[in-house]
Image: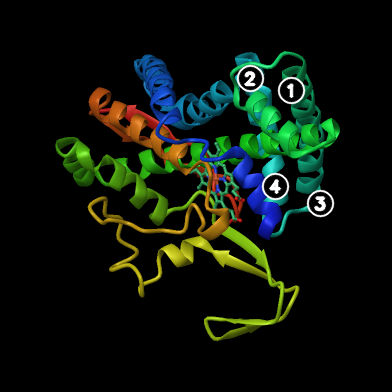
């Protein structure tokens, strides 16, 4: 879907509709709230012994469980799928090394096999899950069952890949930034109605995805810069989100700002999972404010050495 244009893109995007709308979100909210409570129980338990890694205990688990639960994947598969998603993402880096690309290729092969098998299973035994629903839709769009299966396989793979890594980064970044700004955290505890604004400010201040790319289909001029046909253009999301022409004091993190940003892109490719990511972040922050008032960062976060997709590998926290 991200590589399609015009009518081809419209056809695929329409086939999934608004995946996280007013009907689906309340159902997902219930299971996400339960998962947040379970993960915070685990974090609280670990913190009794001193420090704990917020990233592996909470941030990596919540998005995997949310997307895995929605797609009705077996929870026993989550660890493998998560690790394959982490490896696959190198292919979307700006300048991946040969060994990173090899890792990405190997992960892609395994993911392909996994999601092709999933489509075949849902074909044999359809249920009330999104993959079965997409199969029903695509059977009406394609005369050939193989073509329908291929379209649904690509959708399932895309939706899976788009979700866990980006959202895990949002969750860790959110907790890190707020713990580093205790006055704002305290204000938020007193004004929980502004939790959604805080999530938008985190997305603006440090976007999980830093590069959005396009290829010019014709000679054009963009903001006064001539661009030839077939040239690739990279939008640097962090720079756009910190553009002083659009944001007052852009380098100041301020949860009270009504932040606008390009972290979910814009136009026809606007992120289809934005509402799910927001739901996970607001639910987690609500739970954290209620349950862990004395949380603090106990060591500098460890970031993966990457440009396109940010990733906090480790976020050590403790209780005061
Ligand atoms: C904080 C979390 C997330 C961030 C920062 C993010 C970011 C983005 C961005 C920047 C794009 C557009 C890329 C482009 O314009 O070329 C995009 C597209 C997309 N995202 Fe997300 N995403 C997140 C979470 C999710 C989740 C949870 C899902 C699914 C459950 C998802 C599904 C998609 C899909 C299907 C597209 C393709 C849309 C299209 O091409 O029409 N994303 N996302």
SS class, disc 1:
helix
Q: Is residue 149 left or right of residue 238?
A: right
User: Alpha carbon of mark 3 to alpha carbon of mark 2: how far?
Assistant: 32 Å
Residue 176 location in percent, x, y?
38, 41
Q: Is residue 147 left or right of residue 34?
A: right
Q: Residue at x 71, y 53 (%)?
A: 8
The quadrant of the picture occupied by the C terminus is top left
Residue 12 location in percent, x, y?
67, 45
SS class, disc 4:
helix
User: Alpha carbon of mark 1 to alpha carbon of mark 2: how far?
Assistant: 9 Å
CB-based contact (under 8 Å), mark 1 and mark 2: yes
Image disc number at residue 73: 2
In the image, the residue with mark 2 has its CB under 8 Å from the nearest atom of ligand 1: no
Camera-near label (3 vs 1) is 1
Tell me which numbered mark, 3 or 2, is placed earlier along the sequence: 2
In the image, the residue with mark 4 has its CB under 8 Å from the nearest atom of ligand 1: no
SS class, disc 3:
helix
Q: Residue at x 25, y 30 (%)?
A: 289
User: Alpha carbon of mark 3 to alpha carbon of mark 1: how far?
Assistant: 30 Å
User: Alpha carbon of mark 1 to alpha carbon of mark 4: how far?
Assistant: 24 Å
Query: Where does label 3 land, which residue?
Result: 98
Tell me which numbered mark, 1 or 2, is placed earlier along the sequence: 2
């Amino acid at each position: 879907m991200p590589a399609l244009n015009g009518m081809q893109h419209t056809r695929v995007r329409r086939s999934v509709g608004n995946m996280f709308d007013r009907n689906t979100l309340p159902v997902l909210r219930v299971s996400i709230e339960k998962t947040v409570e379970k993960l915070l129980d685990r974090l609280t338990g670990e913190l009794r012994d001193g420090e704990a890694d917020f990233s592996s205990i909470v941030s990596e688990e919540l998005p995997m469980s949310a997307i895995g639960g929605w797609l009705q994947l077996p929870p026993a598969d989550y660890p493998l799928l998560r690790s394959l998603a982490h490896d696959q993402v190198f292919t979307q880096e700006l300048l991946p090394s040969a060994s990173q690309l090899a890792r990405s290729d190997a992960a892609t092969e395994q993911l392909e096999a996994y999601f092709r098998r999933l489509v075949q299973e849902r074909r044999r035994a359809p249920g009330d899950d999104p993959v079965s629903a997409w199969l029903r839709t695509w059977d009406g769009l394609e005369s050939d069952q193989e073509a329908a299966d291929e379209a649904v396989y690509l959708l399932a793979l895309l939706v899976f890949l788009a979700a866990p890594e980006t959202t895990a980064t949002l969750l860790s970044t959110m907790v890190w930034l707020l713990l580093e700004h205790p006055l704002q955290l305290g204000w938020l505890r007193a004004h929980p109605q502004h939790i959604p604004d805080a999530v938008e400010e985190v997305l603006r201040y440090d976007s999980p995805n830093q590069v959005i790319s396009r290829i010019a289909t014709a000679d054009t001029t963009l903001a006064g810069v001539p661009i030839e046909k077939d040239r690739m253009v990279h939008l640097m999301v962090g720079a756009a989100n910190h553009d002083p022409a659009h944001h007052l004091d852009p380098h100041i993190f301020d949860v009270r700002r009504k932040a606008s940003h390009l972290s979910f892109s814009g136009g026809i490719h606007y992120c289809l999972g934005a509402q799910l990511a927001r739901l996970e972040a607001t639910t987690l922050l609500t739970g954290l404010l209620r349950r862990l008032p004395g949380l603090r960062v106990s060591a500098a976060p460890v970031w993966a050495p990457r440009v396109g997709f940010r990733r906090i590998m480790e976020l050590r926290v403790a209780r005061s």
